[in-house]
Image: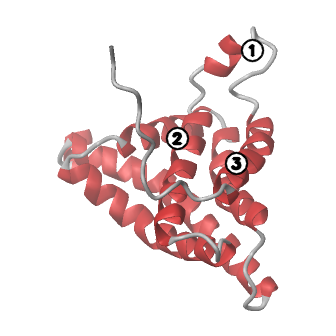
Amino acid sequence: MIHYFFKSKEKLFLEAYMNSGRPMVEERLNLLAAEEEAMKGRAIPLERLIEIFLLPAVKLAMKGPSGRSFLRMQSRLQLDESSMGVKLRSSLYDDSSRRYFEAFRRSLPNHSLEDVSWRFTFMLGTYQYALASTGRLDYISGGLYSSKDYPAALRQMIPYIAAGMHAASPPIEPRKWPAKS
C-alpha cells in the first residue's frame, strides 16, 4: 500500500518531512513579516529575532511525539550529505534561512558577513540539539532539569544565542597552539 501511494521509502520520507516542516517554516516567515512590518524598516532587536526564529520549532516540540519525531529527523537530516538530503533541506529551508539571515545581518550591523554566517549556523545547531530530547540535560543536571521542558529551553537559548551573536569577532590570525610534546 505504501509503495502504491509513495513509490519508494524516500518519497514517503520526503512527504512526511515536508508535511511537518512546511507549517514550521511558514510560521517562521509569517512571524518575521509581522515583526518587520511592526519595526517599520528598523532592525528587529536581536533577542526578539532569535525568539521568533526559535518559537515555531519549540511549539512543534511541544506538540507531542510527532513534533519531536520531526525535530529528531531534522537534526539527522542536517548531517546528511547525500543529494536527497541537500535537495530536501534546500527546498524546505533556503527561502526562510535567507530571509532570516538578512534580518540577522541588519540586527548585527557591526559584524562581518563571516561572523553572522558562522553564528547563524551555530544557532541552527544549538536549537536542533536542544530540542532533540536526547536526555543529556536530564543526566548532567542529575534529574533536576528535563530535556523535554521546551519553554525552559527557549528561555535559556535566547540569551545564550544572543551572547554568541553579540560576541566580539575572533582575531584575524588563529591562535597558535603549543606543539604536542
Residue 157, above or below 171: above
Q: Position of residue 66 (x, y in %)?
A: 55, 37
- The numbered disc on residue 141 is 1
The N terminus - image quarter: top left
Nearer the N terminus, badge 2 or badge 1? 2
Residue 168, horizontal then vertical, whole percent: 64, 57
Residue at x 48% of width, y 35% of height: 72
In the picture, the quarter occupied by the C terminus is top left
> Is 90 on the left-hand or right-hand side of 126?
left
Q: Quadrant of residue 142?
A: top right
Residue visible at 41% across and 49% down? Answer: 17
Quick one: label 2 or label 3, which is nearer the N terminus? 3
Which quadrant of the structure image shows residue 170? bottom right
Against 24, residue 122 (above or below) is above
Location of mark 3 (residue): 59
- Give the alpha-carbon distance from disc 1 to disc 3, as whole Å: 24 Å
Question: What is the secondary structure assignment of the residue under circle 2?
Answer: helix
Query: Cβ–Cβ below 8 Å for labels 2 and 3?
Result: no
Task: Name the secondary structure under disc 3.
Answer: helix
What amino acid type should be assigned to the residue bearing mark 3?
Answer: Lys
Name the one closer to the observer, 10 or 78. 78
Disc 2 from disc 3: Cα separation:
11 Å
Place residue 93 in its image quadrant: bottom left
Q: Residues within 10 Å of mark 1 (few under 14, many from 20)?
A: few
7 lies above or below 113 = above
- Residue drawn where x is 72% and y is 80% of the image: 43
| Disc 2: which residue | 71
